[in-house]
Every structure is written in structure tokens, then in C-alpha cells.
Amino acid sequence: MTIKHVEWRGGRANYRPRIPKDLQVHYDGKEFHFESLGTKDPAVAARKAQQTTKRLDRKWSLLSSSDGGELALREEAMAILQKHGLKPGQAAEYAKYDIEPERFVNELLIESLDQDGQALGIVAERLPPGLRVGYGFSE
């Protein structure tokens, strides 16, 4: 079975697409991106390769359309969510059950404190950009 951008080494699937020439500067001049797909199963490799292609296409599109600032902000927001065990889009699921992830909300409240140390709730303007995006406020 042939899967686009997948090479097999030692029976394991590895994803290896060519990095667009204009973006190679962001990859220390490397011509190819490489990551293990962590499987020996061709069906799983095909699915993971497709997901990885979509992820890299989004990333490369952001890198091509800006100076990388938007991508850096998105990656910062993702790191914040991951730190709290959250995923993008989970807010709707939490709202459905009228709950909020406590540690994440506490961090938002701490960042929203005014100069007197008072918090009147989550204040988007006081949040660092990564937390604003992570919480769902548009940048």
C-alpha cells in the first residue's frame, strides 16, 4: 500500500513531506519534515498521515500569510490549553453541563486582577494574548 508522504523504516510508518521552499527558513533550511506516525498498521498510518497533512497545511498557510506572529500566538494558546488538559472547542461541552475547568479559570482570574489586586471576573483586555486566544476571545 502506498501512502502519500509516508516512508516505511523497520516496518514502522514515518511521515516525510517536502517543506515548501519559502518556508524552509523556519525549519533551519531543512528540505523535508520528518515525524514518526507511531504505527506499523497501514490503515492507521493512512489516517494519521491525512491528519498530519491537514495540521501542517494549516501551519504552513499561517506561516506563508504572515510573519509567523499569528502562528506563534496560536501555538502559545494551544500550550496553555494543553497545560490544563484542555482542547480547543471544549468550552461548549463544559457550558452544556454548566462547569468550568477550575485551574484554567483561576489562571484567567489571576491575570484579570486590577492594580489593586481585585478581580471583577475575567477581563479580556487584561489577559496576555495567548490566554485571550486560549479562552476564546478573538485577537
Image (cartoon, helix red, strand yellow):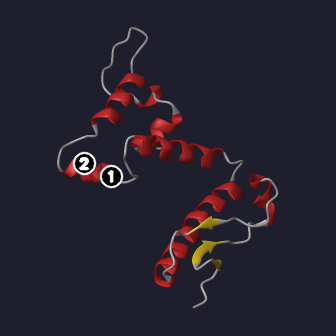
Q: Quadrant of the N terminus?
A: bottom right
Q: Residues within 10 Å of mark 2 (few under 14, many from 20)?
A: few
- Residue 42 vertical placement versus 16 (above, below): below
Q: Position of residue 40 (x, y in %)?
A: 51, 78
In this rendered view, identify the residue nearer to me: 83 or 93: 83
Kind of residue sitting beneath label 1: Gln
In this rendered view, identify the residue nearer to me: 120 or 63: 63
- Rounded to the nearest angstrom, the CA distance separating label 2 from label 1 is 6 Å
The quarter holding residue 37 reads bottom right
Q: Is residue 17 left or right of residue 74?
A: right
Q: Is residue 33 visible in this depiction of the protein?
A: yes
Residue at left offset 39%, top offset 52%: 87
Q: Secondary structure at mark 1?
A: helix
In this rendered view, identify the residue nearer to me: 104 or 8: 8
Q: Residues within 10 Å of mark 1 (few under 14, many from 20)?
A: few
The quarter holding residue 103 reads top left
Q: Is residue 24 left or right of residue 77?
A: right
Q: Is residue 137 visible in this depiction of the protein?
A: no
Q: Position of residue 105 (x, y in %)?
A: 32, 33
Kind of residue sitting beneath label 2: Tyr
Residue at left offset 43%, top offset 46%: 82
Residue at left offset 51%, top offset 30%: 128
Q: Label 2 belongs to which residue? A: 94
Q: Are marks 2 and 1 in contact (CB under 8 Å)?
A: yes
- Residue 72 vertical placement versus 40 (above, below): above
Q: Position of residue 3 (x, y in %)?
A: 59, 84
- Residue 58 vertical placement versus 44 (above, below): above
Q: Label 1 belongs to which residue? A: 90
Labelled disc at residue 120? none
Q: Secondary structure at mark 2?
A: helix
